[in-house]
Amino acid sequence: MVKQEVISLISRLPENATLEDIIYELYILQKHKNAMVAIENGDVFTVDEVKGLLVKQ
C-alpha cells in the first residue's frame, strides 16, 4: 500500500521534479497521515480550546 502511494505521488509530480521536491511531498504526505490518525483518536483541540490556552498564558 505505501509503495503504491509513493509511486502515485511521484507520478503526479512534473518531469523536472527534483529529489528535494519528492522528499518534501513525502514529508507532507506523512504529516497528513499523522494528522488523520490524531483526528481519529481525538488527539486534537478545538479552536476555542486553543484560544483558552493562549489566554491563560
Image: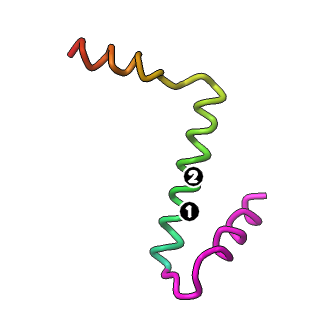
The label number, if any, that marks residue 13 in the structure image: none
Residue at 60% of width from left, 30% of height from top? 39
What span is in magenta?
A: 1-18
> Where's residue 34, x and y in %?
57, 42
Image quadrant where residue 57 sits: top left
What is the residue that sits farthest to the front in this orientation?
48
> Where's residue 6, x and y in %?
68, 66
Residue at 52% of width from left, 82% of height from top? 17
Q: Which residue is mark 2?
A: 30
Give the amino acid type for the residue marked by disc 1 in the picture.
Leu
Q: Secondary structure at mark 1?
A: helix
- Report the magenta stretch's main SS: helix
Query: Is disc 1 surrounded by few (<14), some (14 to 19) or many (20+) residues within 10 Å?
Result: some
Q: Secondary structure at mark 2?
A: helix
Label pair 2/1, CB-CB below 8 angstroms? yes
What's the CA distance linking mark 2 and mark 1?
6 Å
> For the N terminus, which image quadrant?
bottom right
Give the amino acid type for the residue marked by disc 2 in the picture.
Gln
Q: Is residue 1 above or below residue 21?
A: above
Query: Is disc 2 surrounded by few (<14), some (14 to 19) or many (20+) residues within 10 Å?
Result: few
> Where's residue 9, x and y in %?
65, 68
Residue at 33% of width from left, 14% of height from top? 52
Position of 49 with respect to 33 (left or right) is left
Position of 17 with respect to 41 (left or right) is left
> Where's residue 32, x and y in %?
57, 47
Residue at 72% of width from left, 62% of height from top? 5
Q: Is residue 46 above or below residue 2?
A: above
Q: Which residue is mark 1?
A: 26
What is the residue that sits farthest to the left in this orientation?
57
**Magenta highlight on residue 12:** yes
6 or 50, nearer to the observer? 50
